[in-house]
Image (cartoon, rainbow, N blue to C red):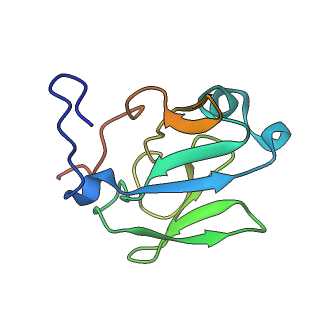
Amino acid sequence: MDPADRTVRSGTRLNAIVLLRLDDASLAAETRTRAADGVVAYTAICTHNGCDVDGYNAEQFALSCSCHESEFDARDGARVVDGPAPRPLPALPLKIVDGLLVVARPFTSRVGFERG
């Protein structure tokens, strides 16, 4: 929802997010500040070419994009661990309000990919 005019923009794929519940103790310090009881949220749009982040390797806690095989560490701010992605996935800070998971702040950086 746009905070200025409260317009819900549910039609754009830029609103797609990945939610994961991880052990809070396993999260990097900065990631923990954006998590809510171990739940982290990242854009589902790869920072390489804008494909969908559509995979998850539970053993390595790695989100992945099958287009060009970029991988991102979900425990450490979705930093790039493999592939051509130039930057981490933007995170969506969360919080718990009255027992509900809600968005705390906007994405940590611009959602989408860099045009070259």
- Considering every residue shown, the one lying at the far bottom of the view is 66
- Considering every residue shown, the one lying at the far right of the view is 25
For residue 88, above or below residue 64: above
Q: Nearer the viewer, residue 44 or 105?
A: 105
Tell me which residue sits at (81%, 47%) in the image.
23
User: Quarter-wise, where is residue 16 in the image?
Assistant: bottom left
User: Quarter-wise, where is residue 106 in the image?
Assistant: top left
Q: Nearer the viewer, residue 70 or 90?
A: 90
Q: Is 25 on the left or on the right of 43, as rendered?
A: right
Residue 14 lies, in percent from the top left, at 27, 53
Quadrant containing the N terminus is: top left
User: Quarter-wise, where is residue 27 in the image?
Assistant: top right
Residue 28 lies, in percent from the top left, at 72, 35
Look at the image and tell me whether residue 43 can be seen: yes
For residue 101, above or below residue 19: above
Q: Is 58 on the left or on the right of 72, as rendered?
A: right
Residue 89 lies, in percent from the top left, at 45, 48
Tell me which residue sits at (82%, 43%) in the image.
26
Look at the image and tell me whether residue 73 can be seen: no
Residue 33 lies, in percent from the top left, at 64, 25
Count the numbered circles shown. Answer: 0
- Considering every residue shown, the one lying at the far top of the view is 4
Q: Is 74 on the left or on the right of 25, as rendered?
A: left
Tell me which residue sits at (20%, 47%) in the image.
9
Q: Is 115 on the left or on the right of 51, as rendered?
A: left
- Considering every residue shown, the one lying at the far front of the view is 98
Q: Nearer the viewer, residue 102 or 62?
A: 102
